[in-house]
Image (cartoon, helix red, strand yellow):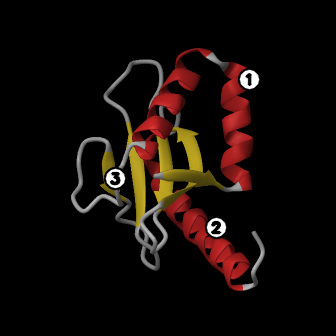
Amino acid sequence: MIVDWTGEFDRWLTRAEDQGGRLLAVVVALLQALAELPARPTEESATFKRVRQARRHELWRVAHPFEPDVAVRIICWFPEDDRVVLALIGFDKKPIGDVFYASASARGEALVDAWLRRQEGGAQ
């Protein structure tokens, strides 16, 4: 699977790279899990779950097993071709909990809409 990402995700990833440590290690592991997918998930697992709050697009969250210091999540979307996954938003939910999913789904769907508009317009 080819992992692509939005500008918003890129800015978050840059901050994670600057911070380093366990946060960065978990982010890299989650991106690797996405890259190793043979196709979009068809069933939920501990690592891949649908974002239930999303209504217009099928968003997925990528998560790791419990760790006391970080709770990284990546919100992603799989375009139709099954060769690419688009990482939309990354965050550490440890300090904020599950409340973030409602706003992440709205932001994620808006990012998917913007990506689709760019694709229709021929921009790469």
Q: Which mark is residue 38?
A: 3
Residue 100, x across and y down, in percent = 51, 50
Q: Nearer the viewer, residue 121 or 100?
A: 121
CA separation, marks 1 and 2? Answer: 24 Å
Q: Residues within 10 Å of mark 3 (few under 14, many from 20)?
A: few
3D distance between C-alphas at marks 1 and 3: 31 Å
Q: Position of residue 80 (x, y in %)?
A: 45, 75
Residue at image mark 1:
18
Mark nearer the N terminus (1 vs 2): 1
Residue at point 72%, 31% (across, down): 15
| Pointer 3 or 2: first along the chain | 3
**80 shown above or below 94:** below
Pick the front one: 85 or 25: 85
Q: How many marks?
A: 3
**In the image, what residue occupies the spot 75% across and 68% down?**
124
As helix, strand or loop, the secondary structure at mark 3 comes to loop
Which marked residue is nearer to the observer: mark 1 or mark 3?
3
